[in-house]
Amino acid sequence: MKSRLVTTQRIVETAAALFLQHGFTAVSMDQIAAAAQVTKMTVYQHFRSKEILLLQCLRWRLERREQYLDEHFKGLPPSSRRVLDVFIWMAEREGKGSFHGCAFLKATQEMGATLPEVRAIALEAKRMMRNRLVGMLQAASISDAERLGEALSLLLEGAQALSLIEQDSRPFEAGRREAERLLASKIQG
């Protein structure tokens, strides 16, 4: 049983990386099998189709992101400045190796019309991030946390899109500076 779970995890992690880098339609099950060092039959034993594998990859990315952020902020006292850490984290994450953009957005753009579950997972991911930001602001007693959290969420999204286009982390730095300015206006105002 443990061996099966390890193989499943290896296939998911491998496919997630390939889908993010090359796109869903450009990656074959043969490529996934080769990169995961398993047979194509093994991939199909774990996942009946490439679409099911894509959905599992997106769920895995979402779970991994949420676990990381939960751990990162665990035990830290509430502070409006904590939301700035999310910009820093995204810049570091995007800057490792190369810039591939948002897996949820890319999957939705490519498969959302034919596989509605992709859009549903992407929507969940975006809402969870926005809700996390709002919750952080509420915990820090920032007025109008809902609206500010939405604005910061949009800044994150824009920074992620520009970092893909520019292949640089500077959009996250600019987003963080603007987020800092918005926070300061709420604290001073």
Image (cartoon, helix red, strand yellow):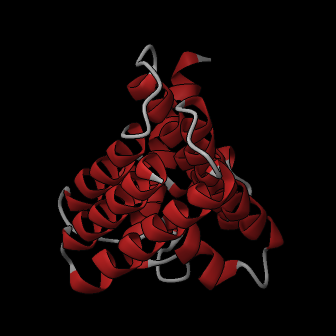
Residue at the far front: name it: 189
Q: Quadrant of residue 141?
A: top right
Image coords of residue 52 (percent x, y)? 72, 58
Badge count: 0
Q: Is residue 42 visible?
A: no
Front residue of this view, candidates 109 and 177 = 177
Query: Which residue occupies 50% across, 38% down?
Result: 64
Query: Which residue occupies 44% across, 39% down?
Result: 80
Front residue of this view, candidates 155 and 137 = 137
Q: Quadrant of residue 166?
A: bottom left
Query: Which residue occupies 49% across, 28% down?
Result: 6
Q: Quadrant of residue 165?
A: bottom left
Q: Is residue 176 visible?
A: yes
Image coords of residue 123 (percent x, y)? 72, 63
Q: Is residue 164 above or below residue 77?
A: below
Front residue of this view, candidates 141 and 84 = 141
Query: Which residue occupies 33% across, 81% down?
Result: 162
| Image quadrant in which the N terminus is located | top right
Relative side of 84 to 146, left or right: left
Image coords of residue 101 (percent x, y)? 39, 71
Relative side of 53 to 187, left or right: right
Q: Is residue 19 above or below residue 133?
A: below
